[in-house]
């Protein structure tokens, strides 16, 4: 079933933030918490330090009325930096690949920082774009 959620980026303190948000909303993360070290090594990808391997790649926390907060830690070793504009993303999870492609195409018009829609190693058909008004959108669909 399609859903919309909010995706947050942190610089190494996702776990602390989600412990706080869990206390605030009286909830616990749903599904497995994925860490960067859980991903299989890919040829040409940079190695991660032990600290980065423990960082959160993906976590989901239900809050109110079915809304879900999702988050990741950004990795400085991969050139990531946190700033206003990349700290919050609207995450769309449509029902079909065709709908995902259509949403991405429409939201990307006159936008920037687009990744295109690609099959990702974490099992998602995924893409992200900054629209013409500076709003960041992520679209994902299980493979």
Image (spheres, grey):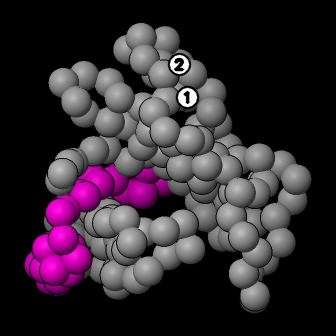
Q: Is residue 123 above or below residue 108?
A: above
Tell me if mark 1 has few (under 14), some (14-19) or many (20+) residues whose alpha carbon lies within 10 angstroms of its own. Answer: few
Q: Circle 1 is placed at which residue position?
A: 17
Residue 82 position, x and y percent, is: 54, 53
Residue 132 visible to an observer of this rendering:
no
Q: Nearer the viewer, residue 117 or 98?
A: 98
Left/right of residue 69 with respect to residue 79 in the rendered view: left
Tell me if mark 2 has few (under 14), some (14-19) or many (20+) residues whose alpha carbon lies within 10 angstroms of its own. Answer: few
Left/right of residue 29 with respect to residue 66 in the rendered view: right
Q: Residue at x 67, y 50 (%)?
A: 35
Considering every residue shown, the one lying at the far right of the view is 50
Q: Residue at x 18, y 71 (%)?
A: 96
Left/right of residue 108 with respect to residue 62 in the rendered view: left
Q: Residue at x 24, y 57 (%)?
A: 92
Find out whether residue 36 is within the magenta segment.
no
Magenta span: 83-109
């Amino acid at each position: 079933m399609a859903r919309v959620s909010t995706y947050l980026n942190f610089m190494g303190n996702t776990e602390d933030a989600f412990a706080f948000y869990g206390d605030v909303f009286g909830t616990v993360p749903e599904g497995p918490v994925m860490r960067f070290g859980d991903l299989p090594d890919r040829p040409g990808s940079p190695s991660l330090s032990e600290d980065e391997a423990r960082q959160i790649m993906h976590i989901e926390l239900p809050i109110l009325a079915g809304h879900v907060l999702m988050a990741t830690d950004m990795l400085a070793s991969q050139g990531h930096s946190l700033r206003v504009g990349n700290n919050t993303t609207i995450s769309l999870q449509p029902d079909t690949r065709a709908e995902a492609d259509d949403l991405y195409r429409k939201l990307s018009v006159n936008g920037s920082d687009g990744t295109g829609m690609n099959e990702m190693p974490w099992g998602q058909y995924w893409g992200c774009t900054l629209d013409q008004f500076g709003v960041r959108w992520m679209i994902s669909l299980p493979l």
